[in-house]
Image (cartoon, coloured by chain):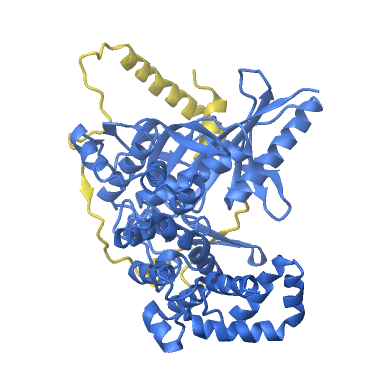
Chain colours: A yellow, B blue
Amino acid sequence: MITRKDVQYIAHLSRIHLQESEVEKLTNDLEGILGYIEKLNKLNVSAVKPTSHVLPIENVFRQDIEKPSLNPKDIMKFSTDNDGKGSFKVPQVIE
Amino acid sequence: MKTYETVIGLEVHLQLDTRTKIFCGCVTHFGKDANSQTCPVCLGLPGSLPVLNQKVLEYGMKIGLALNCAINTFVKFDRKNYYYPDLPKAYQISQYDFPIAKKGSLTITTGEQTKKIGITRAHMEEDAGKLIHSPEIKCSLVDYNRTGIPLVEIVSEPDMRSSQEAYDYLTSLKLLMEYLDVSDCDMEKGSLRCDANVSIREAGNQEFGTKTELKNLNSFKAVKAAIDYEVARQIKMVEAGERIVQETRLWNDEKQMTFSMRSKEEAHDYRYFPEPDLVPFTITENDIEKVRKTLPEFPLEKLDRFIRQYQLSDYDANVLVQDKQLAKFFEDCVMQWNAPKKICNWITSVLKQELNKRKINISEMRLTSGYFVGLIKNVEEGVVSNLVGKEILTIMLDTGRTCMSIIEEKGLRQVSDDNALGAIIDTVLVENASIVEQIKGGKESAIGFLVGQAMKKTQGKANPKKIGELIKGRFQNG
Ligand SMILES: [Zn+2]
């Protein structure tokens, strides 16, 4: 059972600001989705191999060999704010 | 009065010593210009795709095996979600339910006691970026060079019962990792970091008390001090009838206190889910055996062998084994000259002191094992005295020259010619007539003073034993 409180909590964790009406709608939607999952849970899947990835491949590696990095000057072009010396600038976070 | 038992579990993050990051080809050098070692993958730009660095899996297996863990044959990565500017993707790629290694142990030594500490698991993950807080301009600066540097997190069972055991666990773990050559384990550079979970319970109680997680522990000493502080704080609270709150507390090294970090509590809800950008990994028995074959001799094995094979004392063997390079240098020397005890003495007493004085370690010094053996041989064979030998060592360390070339250039050959020494002793006896009278009166201990005077005159080049014998001879002959 999904409650309004659950929705507000998840929204907060995801840093999403919801209007009252949206909370209402999402509570119903999530309830529906979880209801569907409940249905799936009831199926007999003992003959189905567990999946952890949609692609049937595994063991894809790269070697420990360096590749060129980007130039900080170019990176700063898509920062909302920076210090002019290659660092991103964000609102103060205090630990 | 009640007695309490301390319960400690440690989480250690180890930066792996790979050339490149865990999921991209950016290099991992420390201390470079901000964001100069970043790319679309480690910046989390849309459309970029992480690919696992094979070396990281290999190192993860090595660490697991060294900690007596079972290696999982099925391994996958998961997203750990939280919002903080040090994470460009707003999630960290980590491992949740299928880590590389689980269920192991590490043997620690506390005083005379050895104890096995359980290892819950070891998993691979990417490091986060670095934030520099700048209160005067009310902002934080973000450098993503560290983002994506490979980490292995090693989680212990809550098996430690004192801050000293925690300290010894860290020392043993660090040494083992240095032997594995998977990390430089430098706490100052942040390549080894430690968080401590601490709780107390009444002695005899089976249930655990509420734990607090201690962070910001910047040295092994800080770990020990923070645990001691925290245990005292918790006991005081329990005695006052207060409830201990499960929380993260930050150690303040200046004030030597822990402080609550209330703001981040909700952050513990990480909503892990499988990382769809990385495929899973299967590890075969064959893969594991291949890695097992590359494992070096571990510190405890080496310790046993040094005691057995070279008949060293526990103490001496331990001094050598505590430093992998030192242990190797010792064995290099012994290979060239089979005199392990003499070589060990010179290393643990004289050489180590000199290195400490110079604040360098053995791999940084300009002295080869061959030259070092040459020096000790010259002392043993009486070519130079012990004292002069020590002086020559300092010159060798400064210049990288051979012992013989220094002896010849400075004329440091030991004077053991009886006639030459006899003349020196004559002078000393005349100059110290009153002492001579005291000795004749039965105060034999004063002979040492005369030996010292004679040594001074030869500038340490004489063999003190020889001088002692010659001086004693003078008194026996009347
Ligand atoms: Zn990168």
Q: Is residue B120 left or right of residue B27?
A: right
Q: Is residue B357 above or below residue B54?
A: below
Query: Which residue shows up at 41% across the image and 33% down it?
Result: B121
Residue B401 visible in rendering: no
Q: Is residue A50 left or right of residue B177?
A: left
Residue B316 visible in rendering: yes
Which quadrant holds residue B366?
bottom left
Number of marks in the image? 0
Residue pushed farthest front?
Answer: B478
Q: Is residue B224 above or below residue B424?
A: above
Q: Nearer the viewer, residue B89 or B371?
A: B371
On-image quarter of the N terminus of chain B:
top right
Query: Which residue shows up at 48% across the image and 73% down it?
Result: B389
Q: Is residue B443 left or right of residue A61?
A: right
**Residue B62 in the image, given as x and y percentages of width and height:** 32, 43
On-image quarter of the C terminus of chain B:
bottom right
Query: Which residue shows up at 46% across the image and 56% down it?
Result: B129
Which quadrant holds residue B436?
bottom right
Q: Is residue B307 above or below residue B456?
A: above
**Residue B430 in the image, given as x and y percentages of width and height:** 69, 86
